[in-house]
Image (cartoon, rainbow, N blue to C red):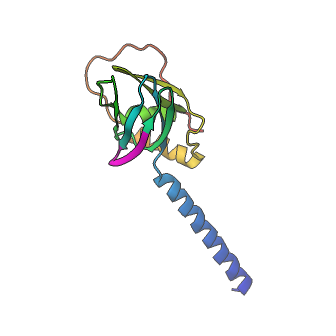
Amino acid sequence: MTTSRKRWWIVSLVALALVGVELGVRLARRPSAGLVLINGGAESIRELVVSCSGVQVVVGDVAPGDMKLVRLESGPSDAVTIAFEQAGNASPGATIAGAELDQARRDGLRMALTFQPGQVVRYLEDDEHVDDASPPVRLWRWLYDVLFATPTAPGPAAPMRAAPVRPLLW
């Protein structure tokens, strides 16, 4: 082999290895879900802490009428716990199932929580910062959902209210 051909092979193998590492990092990264925390009360929220998968994010204090955006790398099995103190609010926090955040992320939405005295209001809104996965990652997620879908509990089926929506591959 000539030296130019050897260089070509070396450059090609290095480029292929870099592409493989990039794909591996993208597949290993957990998806990011958005969570908006809004103070709808007249008193400030103190010591707001969001916990997920053993990781705590200290958000701090939230003034009345103010909001904070938290991005979480969570999976469908990771519950999110929100703890806070607020005068006039007997609730010490809230818990969100990981499957809800995961489905919202897949639909391009984020969950918003409004803390008011005596209640926590939850709703979904558009998320302009949703992670845009590349086609190979979307293909991997689709295959994972098809192959490892959890079976539902036996019993009567819930009535259909709308046609089921399947995520598109591309």
Across and down, in percent, residue 32 comes to: 49, 43
Viewport quadrant of the C terminus: top right
Return the residue nearer the eye: 109 or 21. 109
Residue at the extreme left: 154
Residue 116: image location, x then y, percent: 40, 21
User: Residue 165, image x and y in percent?
Assistant: 50, 25
**Which residue sits furthest bottom?**
2
Q: Is residue 74 visible?
A: no
Residue at the location (57% across, 45% down)?
133
Q: How many numbered discs sit on the rendered protein?
A: 0
Examine the image and state in which quarter residue 169 appears: top right
The span shown in magenta is: 52-60
Compared with 73, 4 (above or below) is: below
In the visual, does 139 lie left or right of 9? left
Q: Nearer the viewer, residue 64 or 153?
A: 64
Image quarter where the N terminus lies is bottom right
Residue 44 image point, x, y percent: 42, 30
Who's the residue at 34% across and 26% down the image? 87
Q: Residue at x 36, y 20 (%)?
A: 117
Residue 53 among those drawn in magenta? yes
Q: Nearer the viewer, residue 143 or 29?
A: 29
Q: Is residue 118 above or below residue 68?
A: above
* Picture quadrant of residue 120: top left
In the rendered image, residue 106 lying in the magenta stretch gets the answer no
For the stretch drawn in magenta, the main secondary structure is strand
Can you see residue 80?
yes
Tell me which residue sits at (41%, 14%) in the image.
160
